[in-house]
Image (cartoon, rainbow, N blue to C red):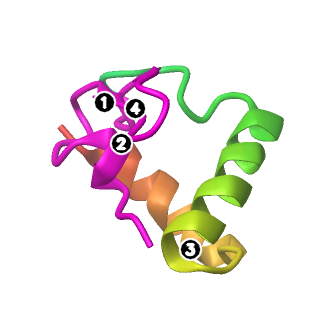
Amino acid sequence: MPACTSCHTDSPLNAGQHAITGKSVKPLAVVANAERFTDQAKAEKWFGRNCKEVIGRACTPAEKADFVTYMSEVR
């Protein structure tokens, strides 16, 4: 299984690049990408895809909340 950093880099403040397609990936940190978690449907879509790919299962609501909270606090 790949790591988040495969596409998102070691710093959530930096833009990344999809490991397979090469498409640009906007930063995860809210301070660097204010729109990251504003669209609930879009956030759920990406949590659905990335949780399964990275940790091999769906994320729990608590895991999602912890992740969003952490990304909101990264400076």
Marks 3/1: CA–CA distance: 22 Å
Compared with 28, 6 (above or below) is below
In front of the other: 49 or 22: 22
Q: Residue 16: which numbered mark, if any?
A: 1
Dot 1 amino acid type: Gly
Looking at the image, is mark 4 or mark 2 nearer the viewer?
A: 2
Left of 28 or right of it: where is 39? right
Marks 4/2: CA–CA distance: 17 Å
Q: Residue at x 56, y 74 (%)?
A: 63
Q: Image quadrant of residue 70?
A: bottom left
Could you tell me which quadrant the C terminus lies in? top left
Marks 1/4: CA–CA distance: 15 Å
Q: Helix, strand or loop at disc 2?
A: helix
In front of the other: 26 or 7: 7
Dot 4 amino acid type: Val
Marks 3/4: CA–CA distance: 17 Å
Q: Helix, strand or loop at disc 3?
A: helix
2 and 1 marks in contact (CB < 8 Å)? yes
Marks 3/2: CA–CA distance: 20 Å
Dot 2 amino acid type: Cys
